[in-house]
Amino acid sequence: MAMKVKLFSDGSSRGNPGPGGYGTILQYVDSKGVLHEKEFSGGEKNTTNNRMELMGVIVGLEALKKPCEVTITTDSKYVTEPFNQNWLPGWIKKGWRNTSGEVKNKDLWQRLLKAAEPHELTFIWVKGHAGHPENERCDSLATAFADTLNT
């Protein structure tokens, strides 16, 4: 039976492009009912919000050492819709093109798909800045990291 993991993620950039950060929380409840939680943050000096949204999910998935059932919660429709609307197979089939032309951030989409391979994923979108505790914490991690690069 695969381990059930919750992944919460958010991205931020100060300018688009500009200094950016991501924040990620992984949660797992063990067989004794004990919650295990790990936080990640990072960023880049010159990036976009969408790249940081993707990086938050990527870093969380890459941290998992064995196949898991992962519920990913984010306030980014940029991340959730390609999975929930099943757009990715079409993008790949068309050589990473969509109705607007070339898919942006192809490198990170490919990295995300590779990180996702061993896992069973469910994507949940939540409204940002609406009081969701883990989303608010991820936002704080992301913006704090972006601010350290914005000096």
Image (cartoon, rainbow, N blue to C red):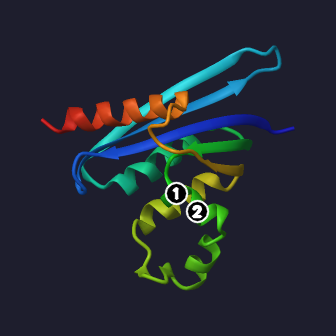
Residue 77, disc: 1
Q: Position of residue 46 (x, y in %)?
A: 22, 52
Tell me which amino acid carries mark 1.
Lys
Q: CA distance from mark 1 to mark 2?
A: 5 Å
Residue at image coords 38%, 55%: 51
* Point 41% across, 80% down: residue: 102
Q: Name the residue at the left extreme.
A: 151
Quarter assignment of residue 112: bottom right
- Residue 81 or 97: which is nearer the viewer? 81
- Quarter containing the C terminus: top left
Q: Secondary structure at mark 2?
A: helix
Q: Residue furthest front?
A: 130
The residue lying toward the viewer, choosing from 83 and 115, is 83
Give the image location of residue 122, x and y in percent.
Answer: 70, 50
Would residue 57 appear left or right of 101 to someone viewing this image?
A: right
Disc 2 target residue: 81
Q: Residue at x 65, y 68 (%)?
A: 85
Residue 118, relative to residue 33: is it above or below? below
Do the residues bearing badges 1 and 2 touch, measured as CB atoms within 8 Å?
Answer: yes
How crowded pointer 1 is (Cα within 10 Å; few <14, some 14-19, many 20+) is rated as: some
Residue at horizontal 58 percent and vertical 65 percent from the top: 82
Total numbered circles: 2
Q: Tell me if 62 is positioned left or right of 20 in this view.
A: right
Q: Is residue 50 visible?
A: yes
In the figure, 35 relative to 20: above or below?
A: above
Residue 39 higher or lower than 8, as above or below: above
The location of residue 84, given as percent across then percent down, is: 66, 62
